[in-house]
Amino acid sequence: MSRVVINQDLLAGGLQRGIGHIEGWSGYLVVPLRYRLRVPVCALASLAVQEHLLTKGVKTSVLISRPELPFEDEDKVEHIVAVAETDEGEPTIIDASFSQLLGLVGMGWSYDVVAKTSTFPAERVVAFKLSETAQFVGWLTEQAVAFQQVNTHPINGYGIDAGKGPLADASAKEIRSAYEQIWNPNNFSDWPAPAGNLEAGKKVASYISANAIEIC
């Protein structure tokens, strides 16, 4: 029986460095290194993870979730993850940018900078089997609710609330419901990545240490 085991420092560190070296993606350079997996990089990070695992002979897909959330308007929530298949039979989701969805409650790198604090969980990358999705969603909901309790809604230099988000004042039940839909396996489908994204993913993957992900 095999299981996907990730090394947080090696995997997250490689992804963070690699993202800063992609031509045409210079917007990420303004994001401090430690926050590069806390912003919308799900496509790039997932493609890099896929490329890394394919070199190890692990069949890996990149899937996209397009949930229908009640608070959406013209800005639709979409999320992309890598899904590895091992001889154990049950796929494993490897999500290297899960914390970007904490932005729904107002948690973001700009909040940390403006409020001069550190609010994100220590985990930068997560790996869990499909059967463990409920546990992951429960844990992420706890992180979101804990942030709500300390959110001071600081105002940045442009007069904008750095702690705002569509679920900033939502109940724990509402937050959990949104996360359940985002990571619901039934809401995932194949994502045909554009050629440019595939090449960028390969380049980012080159910064990932060989033993950042182990199949044990």
Image (cartoon, rainbow, N blue to C red):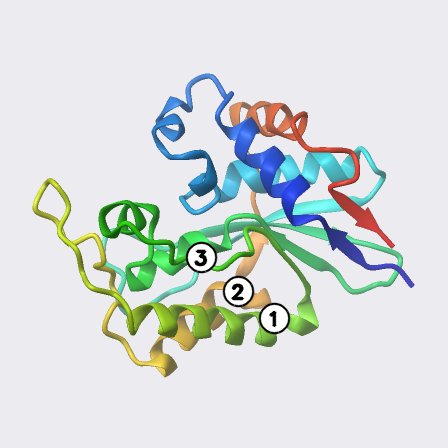
Residue at 51% from the left image edge and 40% from the top image edge: 43
Mark 1: few, some, or many residues within 10 Å (few <14, many ≥20)? Answer: some
Residue 206 higher or lower than 152, as above or below: above
Q: Are marks 1 and 2 in contact (CB under 8 Å)?
A: yes
Q: At numbered mark 3, what does the secondary structure look like: helix, strand or loop?
A: loop
Mark 2, residue position: 183
Image coords of residue 91 (percent x, y): 74, 60
User: Disc 3 or 2, which lies upstream in sequence?
Assistant: 3
Q: Is residue 190 left or right of residue 37?
A: right
Could you give the CA–CA distance between mark 1 and mark 3, rounded to whole angstroms?
17 Å
Tell me the number on the disc at residue 133.
1
Task: Identify the mark nearer the N-term, 1 or 2.
Answer: 1
Which quadrant is the C terminus positioned in? bottom right
Q: Which residue is mark 3?
A: 66
Seen from the viewer's position, the closer of residues 158 and 174 is 158
Q: Mark 3 belongs to which amino acid? A: Arg
Q: Amino acid at mark 1?
A: Thr
Q: Position of residue 4 (x, y in %)?
A: 78, 55
The front one of 98 and 13 is 13
Q: Secondary structure at mark 1?
A: helix
Tell me if residue 173 can be seen. yes
Q: Nearer the viewer, residue 51 or 5?
A: 5
